[in-house]
Amino acid sequence: MAKGGAAFLALQQEVIACQRCPRLRAWCMQVAARKRPAFRAWDYWAKPIPSFGDPAARLLIVGLAPAAHGANRTGRIFTGDRSGDLLFRVLYQTGFASQPISVAPDDGLRLRDVWITAAVRCAPPQNKPTPEEFRNCRPFLAREMELLENLRVVVALGRLAFQACLAVLRERGWAGSPASLVFAHNKQHRLGPRLPVLISSYHPSQQNTLTGRLTEPMLRQVFLRARRLLAKAEG
């Protein structure tokens, strides 16, 4: 990795220590104090969630925010909830993950050529961050994109993550308007020769999967598309 592990580590430590959003910090601590009966034995993480993956990655996955009893409990993004169960299973099927499950930071999971982050790093009440909370977290996403020097493809999981990515990419040189791009599942957006390709995808939330709006094969097609784009980049 061109900028070294120290830069990534320093950024993640800054994320963990962040106190920019009092509402979110209070909610995360409240959830950790109450817990779910199934997780009574857990010592909840209850801090902002660091990103996870391969610092030399060419693929970046951007989610919305940690789940209250998922990453807010386990301390690893997309870990400990149904959304993550589906995501990591598909990443394993498409060669981006060493195993199909993610239950805790020490479970042996390794990501290959992929880095996973979120538009907001703290679990929000009702899974709805405010516009100000998105803005507060945006610099972290921008700095991660800068550190990922091999970045070629970004997968945005959900409309709000898609909009967060566009805001950062606009700062990085994209001259377009977010209103000019239509969010749709497995839709590819080319923003310019010096910018990564952006793929929009439905979020693997239970709201989407239980209603059939998103199926496992549909999500797998997103990462197969990403795999093809990375193969072309090698050529």
Image (cartoon, rainbow, N blue to C red):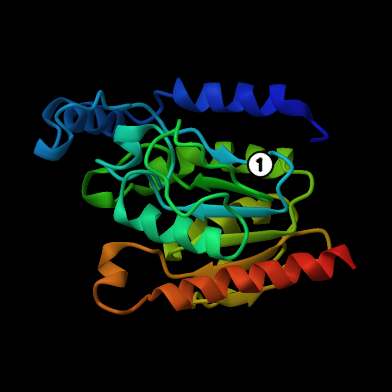
Position of 67 compared to 48: left or right?
left
State whether residue 205 is above or below residue 3. below
Crowd class of label 1 (few under 14; some 14 to 19; many from 20; radius 10 Å) = some
Q: Residue at x 30, y 42 (%)?
A: 70
Position of 178 compared to 218: left or right?
right
Which is more toward the observer, 59 or 144? 59
Q: Residue at x 23, y 27 (%)?
A: 42
Q: Residue 158 lies in what quarter of the image?
A: bottom left
According to the picture, the residue beneath numbered tag 1 turns out to be 54
Q: Residue 205 lies in what quarter of the image?
A: bottom left
Under tag 1, what secondary structure? loop
State whether residue 180 is above or below residue 17. below
Res 190 seen here: no
Which is more toward the observer, 85 or 222? 85
The spot of residue 138 in percent (x, y) is 53, 42
The C terminus lies in quadrant: bottom right
Res 227 seen here: yes
Which is more toward the observer, 66 or 171? 66
Q: Residue at x 76, y 59 (%)?
A: 195
The spot of residue 27 in percent (x, y) is 22, 33
Which is more toward the observer, 109 or 118? 109
The spot of residue 55 in percent (x, y) is 69, 38
State whether residue 189 is above or below residue 45. below
Q: Residue at x 45, y 36 (%)?
A: 107
Q: Residue 194 lies in what quarter of the image?
A: bottom right
The N terminus lies in quadrant: top right
The spot of residue 57 in percent (x, y) is 70, 47
Q: Amino acid at mark 1?
A: Asp
> Total number of numbered labels?
1
